[in-house]
């Protein structure tokens, strides 16, 4: 006999616990199934630990730059065990809070184990069978391991195993020059490792505008990180105590050697072992669960939220999926995935804050587009802080005067971009920002000036 619930949530990631809180509030008897760590990727081996380590790396860098600010701190000695301890403490704080939150939900039972569908509304976990009319999948994704020669013979690190590292790799080779790879690259360079980034494509961060990607490359290279783009036919090889990543680049030595290799080449959804076929749930060719604009799967009464639905690869997109599902189910509020505006940050230093369209997307939209750009050297607050790398850029619809996109690559760019993002949601013309009085001295106060000098996008 299967145990009956009103709802089952599979995965305690970024949508699952919040959804459970709402199901609890509605008085629905709910089972939350988690096979590993509460809080999933973000809490345990994604956002929270990496941003904690990014903070340590930034502090070390500022100490090294003491002379620029008029003080001397001697030579900087990085203690990797202490950095890991600090990271573990911050992670523990989040996961313990989450544990308490879930334990306080009256109608929610936490079930530990790997869940898989055994029928349309039925799930098996550790020999138990659970049944519910509503099932919510929040199983996330994991680091993809590319099928490259040598990958089975040579030890490599992923974002998850990096979390256990309490030493400084003498030379870290990072395969993948995108968001995750670059955050680790700068962090470990600042901890004192030699770092080489190997990227298959001709540029880093393939989805970003060329000027943004080029400026980020310059920032990264300025810190002494070596970058090899156009790397084709990659393979891993052991070379005594060292590891070599062979590559055929258009120029330079066709090999990158180091002591440790981190693979950061994308993510794979955790859907292969979920028994989706048993429940009539369709996936795409990459294994992402197909959903409609309200996160409903092809099976009636089953929703998929977060990274596993392929509609977003961030904590905020997963949480937003929860908000959409809850609004539609309980509030009579027709919220939709297609209503959201893409936004994210790359947490290098200085960070990149992005909102809305890139230049390529704006051009494709068929709109008449205006662009405004300002180097951070013109921002007083950045000069005062001695952090003038990067630039700000904004895209505007020449006809409606609404903002289409923004890239703030510079000091506080991850925060500043929200002032533009909120204006996009409000659908207000950019002149609204120009009429607002901003605080001096801030980065944001220069946005109206940038908007005062718009030119047609070529
Ligand atoms: C290094 C790194 C840094 C990142 N930094 C950021 C950042 O700064 N900002 C940001 O927005 N995003 C960041 N991300 C992305 C972010 O962490 C993920 O997009 C987010 O965690 C996805 O959330 P989710 O709810 O889809 O699933 P997850 O958080 O991945 O949770 C899924 C949960 O489901 C469980 N599970 C899986 N299968 C089963 C099963 N069959 N049965 C039971 N349980 C199961 C898993 O154990 C896991 O706990 C980062 C990712 C990485 C790797």
Image (tube, rainbow, N blue to C red):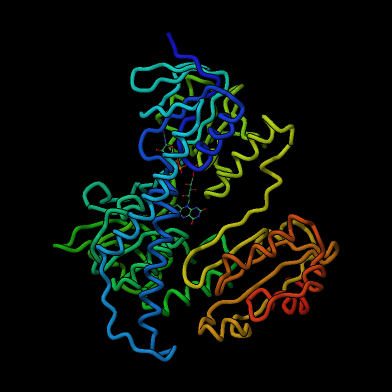
Q: Find residue 57 and report its horizontal and vertical position in percent.
A: 37, 70
- Specify the quadrant of the image occupied by residue 99: top left
Q: Quadrant of ligand 1?
A: top left
Nearer to us in this view, 47 or 5 = 5
In the image, taking residue 191 as reference, residue 397 lies left or right, namely right
The residue shown at (57%, 63%) is 208
| Quadrant in the picture for the N terminus | top left
Q: Find residue 360 and report its horizontal and vertical position in percent.
A: 66, 62
- Specify the quadrant of the image occupied by residue 58: bottom left
Answer above or below: position of 281 versus 402: above
Answer above or below: position of 289 versus 47: above
Q: Find residue 90 and report its horizontal and vertical position in percent.
A: 38, 55
- Specify the quadrant of the image occupied by residue 426: bottom right
Answer above or below: position of 389 versus 130: below
The residue shown at (58%, 43%) is 311
Nearer to us in this view, 449 or 27 = 27
Q: Find residue 106 and report its horizontal and vertical position in percent.
A: 50, 28
Q: Residue placed farthest to the right in the image?
A: 399
The residue shown at (58%, 69%) is 413
Q: Residue placed farthest to the left in the image?
A: 240
């Amino acid at each position: 006999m299967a145990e009956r619930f009103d709802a089952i949530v599979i995965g305690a990631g970024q949508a699952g616990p919040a959804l459970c809180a709402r199901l609890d509030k509605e008085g629905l008897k709910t089972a939350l199934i988690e096979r590993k760590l509460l809080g999933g990727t973000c809490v345990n081996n994604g956002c929270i630990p990496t941003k904690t380590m990014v903070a340590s790396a930034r502090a070390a860098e500022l100490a090294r730059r003491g002379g620029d600010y008029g003080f001397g701190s001697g030579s900087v000695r990085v203690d990797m065990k202490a950095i890991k301890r600090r990271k573990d403490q911050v992670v523990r704080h989040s996961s313990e809070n989450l544990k308490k939150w879930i334990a306080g939900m009256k109608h929610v039972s936490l079930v530990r184990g790997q869940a898989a569908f055994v029928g349309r509304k039925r799930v098996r976990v550790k020999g138990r069978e659970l049944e519910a009319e509503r099932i919510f999948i929040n199983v996330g994704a994991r680091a993809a391991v590319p099928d490259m020669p040598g990958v089975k013979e040579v030890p490599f690190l992923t974002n998850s195993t990096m979390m256990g590292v309490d030493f400084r790799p003498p030379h870290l080779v990072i395969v993948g020059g995108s968001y995750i790879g670059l955050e680790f690259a700068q962090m470990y360079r600042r901890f004192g490792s030699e770092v080489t980034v190997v990227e298959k494509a001709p540029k880093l961060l393939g989805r970003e505008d060329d000027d943004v990607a080029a400026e980020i490359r310059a920032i990264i290279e300025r810190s002494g990180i070596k970058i090899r783009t156009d790397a084709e036919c990659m393979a891993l090889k052991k070379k005594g105590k060292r590891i070599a990543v062979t590559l055929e680049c258009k120029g330079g030595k066709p090999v990158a050697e180091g002591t440790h290799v981190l693979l950061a080449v994308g993510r794979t959804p955790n859907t292969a072992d979920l028994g989706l076929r048993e429940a009539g749930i369709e996936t795409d060719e990459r294994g992402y669960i197909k959903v409609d604009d309200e996160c409903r799967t092809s099976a009636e009464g089953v929703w998929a939220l977060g990274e596993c639905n392929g509609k977003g690869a961030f904590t905020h997109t997963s949480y937003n999926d929860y908000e959409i599902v809850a609004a539609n189910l309980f509030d009579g509020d027709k919220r939709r995935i297609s209503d959201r505006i893409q936004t994210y940050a790359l947490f290098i230093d200085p960070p990149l804050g992005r909102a809305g369209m890139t230049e390529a997307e704006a051009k494709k939209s068929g709109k008449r587009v205006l662009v405004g750009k300002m180097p951070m050297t013109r921002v007083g607050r950045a000069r005062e802080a001695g952090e003038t790398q990067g630039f700000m850029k904004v895209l505007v619809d020449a006809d409606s005067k609404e903002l289409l996109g923004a890239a703030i690559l510079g000091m506080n760019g991850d925060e500043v971009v929200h002032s533009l993002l909120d204006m996009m949601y409000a659908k207000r013309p950019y002149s609204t920002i120009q009429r607002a009085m901003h605080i001096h001295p801030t980065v944001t106060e220069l946005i109206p000036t940038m908007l005062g000098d718009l030119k047609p996008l070529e």
